Image (tube, helix red, strand yellow):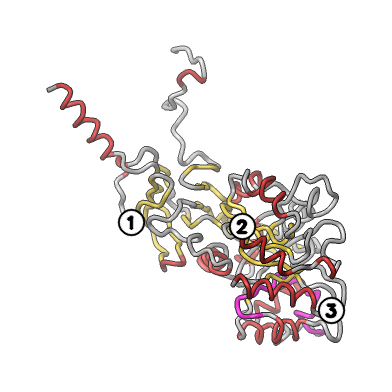
Amino acid sequence: MKLAVLVLLSLSLNAQQAYDLVIKGGHVVDPKNNISRVMDVAVANGRIAAVAANIDASAAKRVASAAGLYVTPGLIDMHVHVYAGTGLKSLTGDLSVYPDPISFRNGVTTMVDAGTAGWRNFPDFRQRIIDRAKTRVLAFLNIGAVGMAPKGENNPEDMDPDEAIRMTQENKDVIVGFKVAHFAHGGWLDIQNAVKAGNATKRPVMVDFGNVDADRNISTLLLDKLRPGDIYTHCYSGRRLEVLPGGKWNPVMQAGRKRGVLFDLGHGGASFYWPVALPAFQEKFYPDTVSTDLHMGSVNAGMKDMLNVMSKMLALGLPVDDVIRMSTWNPAKEIQRTDLGNLDVGAEADITVLQVEKGKFGFLDGAGARYPGTQRFVAELTVRKGVVVWDLNGIAAPGWKDYPYGKTLKVFAQ
């Protein structure tokens, strides 16, 4: 009889704690599912278990109060450079950053490396970074065989689309597309090779457009060479006549968008400027995706981090919901990973809780010029695969008096 009572009690307790975590009372923004209202989010076994009003807190092992905060899918930064640790003095090496110390504190659960590795060194990139990071790291494969290693992107003889296709087929789970960048020669060999690989694997091409001349220009690129779904990054750089002399936004950018070309912000150290972004916003030419172009030259400069770049979009007048869409669901669609960037029940539980702080702030562009703003994003909580990996103010943590320190600390009775 006693055994039966104990079993029933155990089952009752387990039923009462059906969730590992419930995030309560936050303003949930899930662009995929057209949700923007106060709701609760429950997590169990590493996945989203429920998104609903008034989920019973007693059914959770852990509760985080998100009242006054925004609860979103984990942020996706789709332009970073994280192939660090090779010893090379290049983006494939010392100029890259390791993902985990940057990602979670900024609400980012997925980073997409933008072509730092090519087919020849991708296996090293995968074992060195991708497979060891707690952050989900995906990648655009550089069409140059060694990616952004010294001279890696300017050797036309080292661009082998067939090898890039092979490497992608062997790493379908993490390679989401192809990257072309910094090409300093004339002609279109780099774009043609990347598009060939993209067609064969049904993946997009991201272009960081190199030198421009009478033949190689953004009009030809956007209206002829790129396909619908391909991505033009650094869209506010001003280096390729995105803004015409006199300050007018180049209409070819709108024409490219009508063809289905997508536009990524890609802030970087020198690819975002207020005199370019402001004319674009006046024409309602907003980025499809917000991203950082994270590397050692940008992280301590005007760019800083994902939340700083997102906050610049607020300063330019975009609503919170739109900025979240550009940082979650839009990039998920662009890289064809629609399992990400949403809070679907059953989806892996990547969740970000954001505060929109009010005050007087200043935001820098690539030149170090300041633009004023009155709002900025702060990451309060980041959850990756159902595990709390960042908790700024301990909203998901027990108080110290209630914490079961156990054998980890000798605490004497007071």
Q: Looking at the rendering, which quadrant does residue 208 occupy?
A: bottom right
Viewer-side label of 1, 3: 3
- Decide which of 157, 98 is in the foreground and name it: 157
Q: Work out whether 195 lies above or below 361.
A: below
Look at mark 1 in the image and give the residue it sits on: 52
Q: Work out whether 178 lies above or below 397.
A: below
Other residues around mark 3 within 10 Å, as few (<14) / some (14–19) / many (≥20): some
Q: Which residues are magenta?
A: 227-245
Q: Is residue 242 magenta?
A: yes
Q: Do tag 3 and tag 2 residues touch (Cβ < 8 Å)?
A: no
Q: Is residue 194 magenta?
A: no
Identified by mark 2, the residue type is: Asn
Residue 196, image x, y percentages: 69, 75
Look at mark 2 in the image and give the residue it sits on: 171
Q: CA distance from mark 1 to mark 3?
A: 52 Å
Dot label at residue 212: 3
Question: Is 354 on the left or on the right of 233, as rendered?
Answer: left
- Decide which of 412, 231 is in the foreground and name it: 231
- Decide which of 97, 167 is in the foreground and name it: 167
Q: Looking at the rendering, which quadrant does residue 261 occupy?
A: bottom right
Other residues around mark 2 within 10 Å, as few (<14) / some (14–19) / many (≥20): some
Residue 51, image x, y percentages: 36, 56
Question: Is 105 on the left or on the right of 39, as rendered?
Answer: right
Q: Can I make out residue 320 in this image?
A: no
Identified by mark 3, the residue type is: Val
**Which of disc 2 and disc 1 is earlier in sequence?**
1
Identified by mark 1, the residue type is: Ala
Q: Secondary structure at mark 3?
A: loop
Viewer-side label of 1, 2: 2
